[in-house]
Image (cartoon, rainbow, N blue to C red):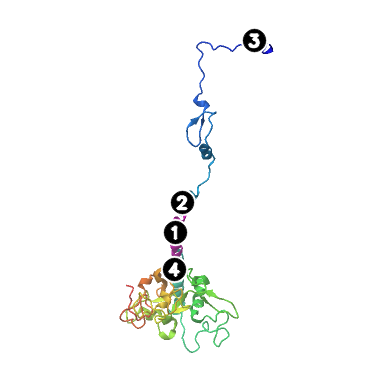
C-alpha cells in the first residue's frame, strides 16, 4: 500500500519537447591515446597493450647496444686523428727549440771568432766535459756535462734549459752534473762530433764556408740534431741495421732517436724523421725516408743530412 502511494506521489518524467536537439558525445569530450594516436571516449577501457605502451619511457637493450656500438666506431676513427694532431704539435715544439738553438749557435760563433762550440777530444779535454772534482774541471755546475758540454756553452744565449728537451723525446735522457750541485736536464739532442771535436778541424765556420771535398756548405751541414745517444752524434754508429736502408748506414743515432739496440729501433717521430739545426743557423725537419749516409760512403752515396762536412750532399 505504501509502495503504491510513493509511486503515485513521484513526479512524472519530463517529456522532451518536440524539436529539442539530441545531445551526442562530441570530439571535445574525447581523450587521445598516447600510444595508438586514436581518440577514445572517457568511458573507454584501455587494453593491456595500450597501458604498457603508455608506461614505457626508457631504452631497450638493443637500442643501448646500438648507441654503444656507434660510440665505439667513432672513437676508433677519431683517436688516431687526435694522436696524430698531438704528435704534430710536439714536432712543431721540437722544431721551435731547434730554431732557438740555431740562433744561439750563430750568436756564440760571433762572440768567439766565427767558431762553433768545440774542444779537443784529447789531453785535458774541456772543463765543462770533465767530471766535477776531477782535474781541469770547471766550478759547479759547469762540470760533469760529458759530451753535452756544448749545452752550457750556448745556454747564456737561450737562457732556458728547457730548449734542450723535445716533447716527443725520452724523459730518461739526462745530462748535467749530479754532485756536488744537482743540475740534471732533459737532453734529447746531440752535437755533430766532427764539429765538437776540435781535432777534426771543422769548428771554424770559415772552414765549412769553403766547403768540403763533396761541396757541402754551412746550410747543409748538421750541427745539432735529435739523437738517441745523449749529447753527440756521428755517421759511423751502425749498432742497428735498418731493413729499408742501404748498408752500411751510420746515422742510427738520428734515425733511432728514441733508442736503439742490435735488434730494435725506436723512432721519435713518424718514419724516423728528426729536427736538425744547421751550420748557417736555420732549422728544419728531415723525414726519415731521406736519412742516408755513412762515413765509408761519403764520396759515393753522400749523406742527408751532411754529418761529415766532406760528404756529398744527398738531400738535394
Tag count in the figure?
4
Lower position in the chain sequence, tag 1 or tag 4: 1
> Residue at position x 52%, y 70% from top?
162
Q: Which residues are magenta?
A: 71-88
Under tag 2, what secondary structure? helix
Q: Nearer the viewer, mark 1 or mark 2?
A: 2
3D distance between C-alphas at marks 3 and 2: 76 Å
Q: Which residue is mark 4?
A: 95
Lower position in the chain sequence, tag 3 or tag 1: 3
Locate residue 207 relative to residue 68 in the image: left or right.
left
Looking at the picture, does residue 245 appear above or below residue 1? below
Residue 252, given in percent of the width and then of the height, sits at 41, 77
Q: Which residue is mark 2?
A: 66
Q: Please, which residue is most extreme toward the left here?
A: 300
| The stretch drawn in magenta includes residue 41 | no
3D distance between C-alphas at marks 4 and 3: 114 Å
Locate residue 16 relative to residue 82 in the image: left or right.
right
Lower position in the chain sequence, tag 3 or tag 2: 3
Under tag 4, what secondary structure? helix
| The stretch drawn in magenta includes residue 74 | yes
Amino acid at each position: 500500500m505504501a509502495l503504491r502511494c510513493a509511486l503515485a506521489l513521484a513526479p512524472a518524467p519530463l517529456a522532451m519537447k518536440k524539436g529539442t536537439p539530441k545531445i551526442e558525445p562530441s570530439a571535445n569530450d574525447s581523450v587521445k591515446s598516447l600510444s595508438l594516436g586514436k581518440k577514445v571516449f572517457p568511458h573507454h577501457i584501455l587494453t593491456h597493450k595500450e597501458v604498457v605502451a603508455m608506461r614505457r619511457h626508457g631504452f631497450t637493450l638493443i637500442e643501448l647496444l646500438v648507441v654503444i656500438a656507434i660510440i665505439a666506431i667513432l672513437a676508433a676513427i677519431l683517436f688516431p686523428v687526435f694522436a696524430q694532431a698531438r704528435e704534430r704539435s710536439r714536432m712543431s715544439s721540437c722544431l721551435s727549440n731547434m730554431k732557438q738553438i740555431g740562433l744561439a749557435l750563430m750568436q756564440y760563433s760571433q762572440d768567439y771568432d766565427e767558431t762553433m762550440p768545440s774542444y779537443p777530444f784529447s789531453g785535458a779535454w774541456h772543463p765543462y766535459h770533465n767530471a766535477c772534482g776531477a782535474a781541469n774541471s770547471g766550478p759547479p755546475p759547469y762540470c760533469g756535462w760529458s759530451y753535452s758540454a756544448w749545452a752550457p756553452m750556448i745556454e747564456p744565449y737561450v737562457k732556458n734549459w728547457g730548449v734542450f728537451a723535445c716533447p716527443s723525446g725520452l724523459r730518461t735522457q739526462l745530462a748535467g752534473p749530479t754532485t756536488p750541485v744537482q743540475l740534471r736536464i732533459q737532453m734529447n739532442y746531440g752535437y755533430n762530433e766532427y764539429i765538437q771535436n776540435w781535432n777534426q778541424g771543422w769548428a771554424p765556420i770559415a772552414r765549412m764556408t769553403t766547403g768540403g771535398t763533396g761541396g757541402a756548405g754551412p746550410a747543409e751541414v748538421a750541427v745539432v740534431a735529435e739523437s738517441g745517444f745523449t749529447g753527440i752524434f756521428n755517421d759511423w754508429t751502425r749498432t742497428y741495421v735498418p731493413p729499408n736502408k742501404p748498408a752500411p748506414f751510420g746515422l742510427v743515432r738520428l734515425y733511432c732517436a728514441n733508442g736503439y739496440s742490435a735488434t730494435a729501433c725506436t723512432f721519435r717521430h713518424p718514419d724516423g724523421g728528426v729536427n736538425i739545426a744547421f751550420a748557417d743557423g736555420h732549422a728544419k725537419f728531415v723525414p726519415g725516408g731521406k736519412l742516408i749516409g755513412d762515413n765509408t760512403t761519403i764520396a759515393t752515396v753522400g749523406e742527408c743530412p751532411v754529418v761529415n762536412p766532406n760528404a756529398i750532399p744527398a738531400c738535394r
